Amino acid sequence: MAQAKLQTEIEAKTRFGYRRHADQDVDAAGIAMHGVVVVGAGPVGLSLAIDLAQRGQSVVLLDDADRIGEGSRAICFSKRSLEFWDRLGVGQRMVDKGVVWKVGKIFHGASLLYQFDLLPEQGHKRPAFINLQQFYAEAYLVDRVTEMPDISLRWRNKVVALEQRNDHAIITVDTPDGPYRIGANYVVACDGARSSLRQMVGAEFSGQVFEDQFLIADVRMTAEFPTERWFWFDPPFHAGRSALLHKQPDDIWRIDLQLNRNADPVAEKRPENVRPRIARMLGHDQFDFEWISLYKFQCRRMARFIHGRVIFAGDAAHQVSPFGARGANSGLEDAENLAWKLDRVLRKTSPEALLESYQVERSAAADENIRESTRSTDFMAPATREEARLRKAVLSLAKETEFAKRMVNGGRLSVSAIYRTPLSTSDGEAWRGGPRPGASMLDAPIIGVSSEVRYLTDAFVNCGRGFTLIEFANGATVDPPDGVGVIRIGDGGLTDFAGLAAARYGAEPDSAYLLRPDGYVAARFRHPTRSAIEAALARASGYD
C-alpha cells in the first residue's frame, strides 16, 4: 500500500541524491582507509555516527537507499533514548514534535482492568516516553549529520563484499558509478534485520518466530482520546484477540490488532477488509489510512555481536517483538554503549579488549529484552491450552487482586539495562538506595550558580564526553584524575533542588559517583579517595 500524503511530503524533503566521493577515485592499487565505517543510516547508525563524530572521530556512513526509511515502524522512544539524543543535540527537537505520554491502561473486555504511571515523580527533564514516527526521528538525525563535517554520509552506497584482515576490514561498495573499495579499522553493521553484513560474516540468528499475526494500521483522524497507551484483552470490537491504540503527531493513530495465525496476509492487508475492523473499534469510519502492514513476532539474536573487525548493533544484532518498545530503544542503547568504547580504542587510551565489554553488556541486554518480549507474546497470544487457561485465570483474578495485576502482560515497556560487567567496581560500603554500579544515571533537578533550575543530565552533557565524577560535597573534595569531569553538588557548586538528587542517589555528604562516558555508573564511594577513583577508572577503561 502506498504512503499517504503526509509521509510523501516528508520523503520529498528528505530524498537524497547520490554523490560521487573522492574515495572512488583512488588508484586501483590503493584503498582509502578510515577509522570507522557505519553501514545503515537508520536511527541506530545515524546516532552512532553522530556520537563518534562529537568525540572527534571521522566516520563514513553508508546506506543503500537514497531516502529516510518508509513504512510503519518504531514510534515509542524512551526517556533514556531522549537523554542520549540530548547529548547528540537533537533531543529537544524530538520532544517538541513528539506526543508525550506516561500513562498506560489495560482493559479486559470493555472494562478497565488497571492503569499505570511510568514516571509518577516530578523533577525529570525528559518524559517517560514520546510517540514519534520513525521517519521524523531519522530526518532530524540526518539534519544533525549534515552539520558535522567529520561524517561522510553516502547514499546509494551498498556494501556487497567484505574482506577481514588482522587489523582492519575492507569492504566493496556498489554505487550508480560502479563499485569501489574502502578500508576501516572497524565496520559497524547497523543495516537492520536483513543485514547483508551478517550474511557476509556467516552468522545466523537464533531464537523464536511466533506464528500469530498482527495487523498494524496507522490512521489519520480527529479524536479526543487522551495521550495514553491503551491495550485490550478480548475487546468487544475484536473478540478473543488483543488490540492496542497509540497517538502519534499529526493526528495519526497507531492501531495494532491480533489476527488468527492462519489468516491470509494478502487479504488482511486490503483496505476494504481493514476498514470494518477499525470502524468497529472506533465506533465510526471517519478516518484515512496512512499505512497498513502485517507482521509476526520474532525474538532472536546473534550469538556474538563482534566478528573480527565487524561489530553488529540494533536489529542487525537482535530482534524483539514491537510490544514494549524494546526494538529501537535497545538499538540506541547499543549505539551509546559502543561509541565511547570505539573512540577510546581508536585513540589508544584503552586496550582493544574494552570492545569485548560491548559483547558482554549488550548481549545480556538483548537476552533480557528477548525474555521479556517472549513472556509478553506468550501471554498475549498463548500457543497452548495450558497457557490460555493461565491467562484466563490471571485476567479474572486481576479484577480483584493486586498480585494478579502484576502478572498481566500487555507488553512490559522498555527500561534501561543494568549491566553485570567487569567494567564496574563493586560497592565497598552499604548503600540504602541509588543507582548501583552498572545502572544508568538518574536525573534530578539542580540549581545553577545563576539560580536557574537545571538537570543533572544537562550537567553531565556540559562536563564533556569522558568520565564524570558527581560529588555530594562536604567541605572537602578529591582532586580527580586527569580528564575526569566533575559535577559538584553543594559547597559553592550546584544546589540540590529540594534534596531530590541526594535522595535519588542515596547520597550522604562526601558521597561520590563515577559515571562512564555513556552515563552508566562505574563506581560509587561513601568516602572517595584519589586511589580508589583511579582504580575504578582503570577498570572501567578496560585495564583490569
Image (spheres, grey):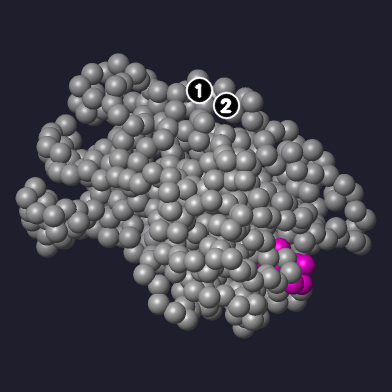
Residue at the location (74% across, 69% down)?
482
Give the residue number, with chain letter if any, for mark 1: 6
Task: Tell me which amino acid carries mark 1.
Answer: Leu
Q: Closest to the observer: 330 or 37? A: 330
Marks 1 and 2 close (CB-CB < 8 Å): yes
Q: Kindly report the distance in space between the C-alpha atoms of the residues bearing marks 1 and 2.
A: 6 Å
Callout 1 environment at 10 Å: few (<14), some (14 to 19), or many (20+)? few
Task: Tell me which amino acid carries mark 2.
Answer: Ile
Callout 2 environment at 10 Å: few (<14), some (14 to 19), or many (20+)? some
Whether residue 174 is visible, yes or no, is no
Q: Quadrant for residue 449, please give it.
A: top right
Q: Closest to the observer: 328 or 310? A: 328
Residue at the location (44% across, 79% down)?
429
Residue at the location (31% across, 53% down)?
412
Residue 341 forms part of the magenta stretch: yes
Residue 295, given in percent of the width and then of the height, sits at 37, 45
Residue 371, given in percent of the width and then of the height, sits at 34, 64
Q: Quadrant for residue 201, please give it.
A: bottom right
Q: State the mark number for residue 10.
A: 2
Q: State the mark number for residue 416.
A: none
| SS state under label 1 | helix
Quadrant location of the N terminus in the rendered image = top left
Q: Which residue lies furthest to the top in this view?
A: 286
Residue at the location (85% across, 58% down)?
32
| SS state under label 2 | helix
Residue 108, given in percent of the width and then of the height, sits at 14, 42
- Magenta segment, which residues? 340-349
Whether residue 53 is visible, yes or no, is yes
